[in-house]
Each structure stands twice: as C-alpha cells, then as structure tokens.
Amino acid sequence: MFYYKLVFVFFSIIQIQVSDSIVFNDTDSIMRSYQDTILFADSLDISINNDINNQLTTDTIFVQIDSNSEYDKGSENWSKIIDIIMSVLTLLALILAIWGEQIRARFNKLNLIINDKNLTGELTKGGENSVGQRDDLILFHLLLRNKTSGIIAKNVRVILVAYSKVKRDGEIEKKLLAGEASFLWTPMEQMNQWIDIADEQTFDFLVLSKQRKVIHPTLSIYFNNFGGAIGINETLRLELKVKADNFKSSKNYFYEISWRGEWSESMETNRSNISIRRVTSLE
C-alpha cells in the first residue's frame, strides 16, 4: 500500500512539472508545485519520510530541467525554420521586384499584332499653309494590339522598313529607308513616338491631301530621298515592323495602296476611289 501511494505522489509531481514547464521557470515554482502535491497526498493520509521527500524533490527538479531543455531545443529549431522561410521569401520578393517583368516575359511571351482599324478614312483639317489656308485631309488608321495580358509592352513603335512603287509599266521599284522612321500614334499632338502599351493603341497609317493630291504614310520623319508618296493611278506597297524593348517581331506586315485620283468627302464614295489591302510582300 505504501509503494502504491509513493508511486502516485511521484507521477503526480512529474505530471504537474512537465505540463507546466513553460510557466515554471525557477526553483520556487517547482517547490510550490511539489508542496501542493504533498498537501494533496496528506489529505489521502499518505506518510512519506524526509529521505523520500528529498529524493522526490531531486527527481522533480531533474524532470523540470529536462523538460525545459527539450522545450528550448524545440523552440530553437522552430525559430531557425522560421528564419530560413523569411529569408527565402525576402529573396524571392527582391528577385520579383528587380526582374519581375523579364521573368513574366520569359514564361508568357509578349505578342504584339497589327489589325486594320479604319481603312475607309476619316475627314479632318490640316495645319495652315503659308497663305493661311488649311488643307482638307483624310486619315487612315491601323491598330496595334497587345494580346498578352499582364505584360506591358515597353517603348513600342511601328516603323516603316521599306516600300515599293509599282510603275505604270508594271515594274516594281523597291527602296529601303535610310533610317528608322516610325508611324505617329493617335492623336499625334498628344503622344510620344515611343509609348508603353498594355492593351491596344491606334496609330495614323496614311494621309490623303486634297491640295497636294497625294497619299503618303504618316511618319515622324521623312528623309530627303523618300519617295513613298503616290499620285493619281499609282500603287504603293509598304513594309511595317513592330518594335519594343521587350518584344522581337517574328514577322513584318505588308500593305498595298492604290488611288484613282478622285477626291470625295464621302467615305463611302472613297471605298471605290482608294484601295488599301494587306499583301504578303513588297513584290
């Protein structure tokens, strides 16, 4: 019976000390827990001599120290794991902040295409000439689309690479531009030559002048030897290329333009006077 009571007190002390090891951090707390257990044992009429008490106290302290040691080791391990995770997350955030655009572009390639927008024409007025007169103009537009969601095309421009003119005898004269000449974004008065595009943007493609009686591409610059304007009953072919800092075009676009020489402010009538169509080459 004595040994049964002794074992009961021993395991009661161990249970109290282990379960409260996080709270008890000094010897006084351990002894208070032990004394409470002894009082409980006394209420059950358990008699324990001093040697046994001393031994139990030593065992209790040992269990308390061992439990705290295990807790400290576990806490230290979890702290190291959390530090590693936070370091990895910080590194990933830094990589995305610096190279996020390049990473997205690598796995989700940018796709810029040219679509027809307004090939029947739009009537407008040009600037005043030397005698204060304003020319009547018809503008024709194309549309540049960014088909890749989530990636912004940087410093986009549409340039004229080359052109060819079909002479009256059927001979084709092909010419390359001396430098890079880009088409004008719409509206030309408010747009830079190089812009960022998230979804789509219209640009001026051709202009027909009533006074000059010619059609020519609307470019940011015209070189001295530029011959890409057509008059009555002439045909012009243009080669366009899309450029951007984060995009490399795999193909160019070709358009053929013909004009019968008649002017009309009716866009429906101009359908039969002006022909603008996509072709496969300059020849």
Image: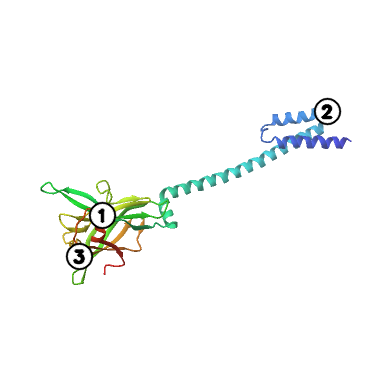
The kind of residue on which mark 1 rests is Met
| Residue occupied by mark 2 | 42
The nearer-to-camera label among 2 and 3 is 3
Q: Height in image: 208 above or below 46? A: below
Disc 1 or disc 2, which is closer to the eye? 1
Image-quadrant location for residue 246: bottom left
In space, the residues marked 2 and 3 are separated at their CA atoms by 119 Å
Q: Earlier in the sequence, mark 2 or mark 3?
A: 2
| Mark 1 to mark 3 CA distance (whole Å) | 20 Å
Pick the quarter of the image with the C terminus: bottom left
Packing grade of label 2 (10 A; few <14, some 14-19, many >=20) is few
Q: How is the image coloured?
A: rainbow
What residue appears at the point 83 percent right and 28 percent down from the top-left corner?
A: 42
Residue for point 36% across, 54% down? 145
Q: Earlier in the sequence, mark 1 or mark 3?
A: 3
Residue that mark 1 sits on: 267
The image quadrant of residue 224 is bottom left
Helix, strand, or loop for circle 2?
helix
Q: Position of residue 254 (x, y in %)?
A: 29, 64
Q: Is residue 276 left or right of residue 3?
A: left
Report x, y in % for residue 185.
Answer: 28, 51
Question: On the picture, is 71 further left or further right than 10?
Answer: left
